[in-house]
Image: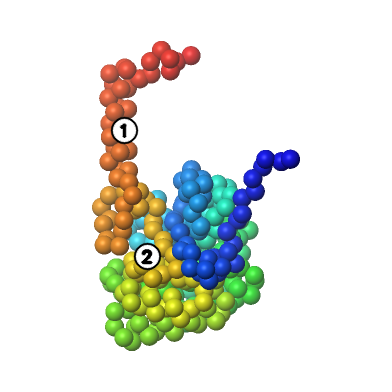
Amino acid sequence: MSVHKEVKRVTTHVLQAMKARGEKIAMLTAYDYSMARILDEAGTDILLVGDSASNVMAGHETTLPITLDQMIYHAASVVRAVKRSLVVVDLPFGSYQGNSTVALKSTIRIMKEAGAHAVKLEGGEEIAESVARILSAGVPVMGHLGLTPQSIYKFGTYTVRAKEEAEAEKLLSDAKLLQELGCFAIVLEKIPAQLTRRVSEELIIPTIGIGGGPSADGQVLVTQDMLGITKDFQPRFLRRYLELYDLIRGATEQYIEDVKSQSFPNEKEAY
Ligand code: KIV
């Protein structure tokens, strides 16, 4: 008898079933092989290769500079590490807006070259044609509404979105449109908790919140924020589970001291 335990992969259908039975979905960002392996093994349902790699991995001020080639590099590294999680990849700024042919071409590159399982796009009605075109090619699409960082220069700030009635109604109607088009889930970023509740109740597809309160069907955080590596980013919605910046800095200082004092390497650490 084989003792090999088969890992059951998370699919878009598994996520729908989780919403239906009220089980919350845990999503985190991943940009590299080593971290993705840990997050996957820990049981994260969805790994998002977010364009936040532009900030977190490359040190840019916004998500706008990251390229499709760079996203594919990050995504391929994550896919190689994963046994169970669903890997969703952000279409970066400039790779889908305003042209559904370009959107489909970018998606096909991500699916073929990185081996991703799904893509995520920011926006509602204005990107409907691109969403429909990608879905028609059989690629699962995750939506992203509320604070959409690729439009930062249009909004000017990273503050809470859809506080006013008109913006909230537009967000709800965009969410319904994305569901009708066939999206399998929608990220709701930095919107009032009440609006998250309303959208989550009115949709049958899962909502994944970040700064959207407890009623979303799942939650997502940037892993480096959750682990306390990005020390200076402290929004109210963020819960830090570690203070890795300080731990890594302390370990590095110790290593430097050991090298300088010649206590590393010792005899046992040499051949
Ligand atoms: O790029 C990203 O990390 C994201 C999450 C914040 C949802 O889009």
* Residue displayed at 48% across by 78% down: 203
Q: Are marks 2 and 1 in contact (CB under 8 Å)?
A: no
Q: Quadrant of residue 233?
A: bottom left
Asked if residue 70 shows in the view, the reply is no
Q: Nearer the viewer, residue 174 or 94?
A: 174
* Residue displayed at 53% across by 71% down: 20
Q: Nearer the viewer, residue 94 or 164?
A: 164
* Residue displayed at 49% across by 54% down: 44
Where does residue 80 sit, x and y in percent of width and height? 58, 48
Q: Which mark is residue 210?
A: 2
Ligand 1 closer than 8 Å to the CB at disc 2? Answer: yes
Where does residue 97 sit, x and y in percent of width and height? 48, 73
* Residue displayed at 34% across by 53% down: 225
Looking at the rendering, in which quadrant would you find the N terminus? Answer: top right
Amino acid type of the residue that numbered disc 1 sits on in the rendered structure: Ala
Circle 1 sits on which residue? 251
Ligand 1 closer than 8 Å to the CB at disc 1? Answer: no
Asked if residue 89 shows in the view, the reply is yes
Determine whether 17 is above or below 74 in the image: below
Amino acid type of the residue that numbered disc 2 sits on in the rendered structure: Ile
